């Protein structure tokens, strides 16, 4: 795989959560959203030579996803559950705004995690990235499970406050 293909693949993998949320918000049906996501990924791969590196990959991918949703909608135009075009555009705008908020929150979370002490950061990593249970953490840290639960609760509260503060600053 050459460097261009590798970079494209990295961009494609990174944008998957955003595409999934966007398409799901546009369609409302999980099965249909999964099908459209798969079709969107195929189109993105077919058009990979059209992507200009250095531009916003996410915006480009979301535009293609939007067109794939419209194609899907035309296939089911006779269905009573299909939204009119104005409503679909409104939903697309709202979904795009939520994606921006999600990106801001993820960036804030990364910053806020960096502000935690190393032991607290490690506890969060083990609990959520490694999916260790409270009992496992308690045994590994030689602490009572109740103490671990309380510490995790306080860390989560601190992270939530930090994220709210940082995202509020970004809006001001």
Image (spheres, helix red, strand yellow):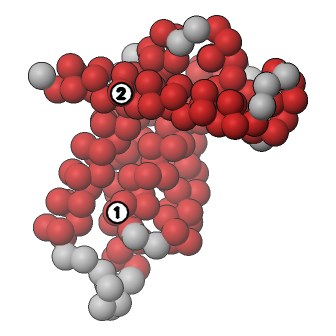
Q: Earlier in the sequence, mark 1 or mark 2?
A: 1
Residue 130 seen anywhere in this rendered image of the structure? no
Question: Who's the residue at 45% across and 26% down the image?
Answer: 159
Is disc 2 surrounded by few (<14), some (14 to 19) or many (20+) residues within 10 Å?
Answer: few
Residue 35 in picture, x, y percent from top left: 56, 66
Q: Would you name the residue on which mark 2 appears? A: 161
* Res 80 quadrant in image: bottom left
Is disc 1 surrounded by few (<14), some (14 to 19) or many (20+) residues within 10 Å?
Answer: many
- Whether residue 109 sits left or right of residue 97 in the image: it is right
Residue 48 in picture, x, y percent from top left: 52, 35
Does dot 2 land on a helix, a strand or a loop? helix
Where the N terminus falls, by quadrant?
top right
Does dot 1 land on a helix, a strand or a loop? helix
- Whether residue 90 sits left or right of residue 3 in the image: it is left
Question: Who's the residue at 58% across and 8% down the image?
Answer: 117
Q: Would you name the residue on which mark 1 appears? A: 26
């Amino acid at each position: 795989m050459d460097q261009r293909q590798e970079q494209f693949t990295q961009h494609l993998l990174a944008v998957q959560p955003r595409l999934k949320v966007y398409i799901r918000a546009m369609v409302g049906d999980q099965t249909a959203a999964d099908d459209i996501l798969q079709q969107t990924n195929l189109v993105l791969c077919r058009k990979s030579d059209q992507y200009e590196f250095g531009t916003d990959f996410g915006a480009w991918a979301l535009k293609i996803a939007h067109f794939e949703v419209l194609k899907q909608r035309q296939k089911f135009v006779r269905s009573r559950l299909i939204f009119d075009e104005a409503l679909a555009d409104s939903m697309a705008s709202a979904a795009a705004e939520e994606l921006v908020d999600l990106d801001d929150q993820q960036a804030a979370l990364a910053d806020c995690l960096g502000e935690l002490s190393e032991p607290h950061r490690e506890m969060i990593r083990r609990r959520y990235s490694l999916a260790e249970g409270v009992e496992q953490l308690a045994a590994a840290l030689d602490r009572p499970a109740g103490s671990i639960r309380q510490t995790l609760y306080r860390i989560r509260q601190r992270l939530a406050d930090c994220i709210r503060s940082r995202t509020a600053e970004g809006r001001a």
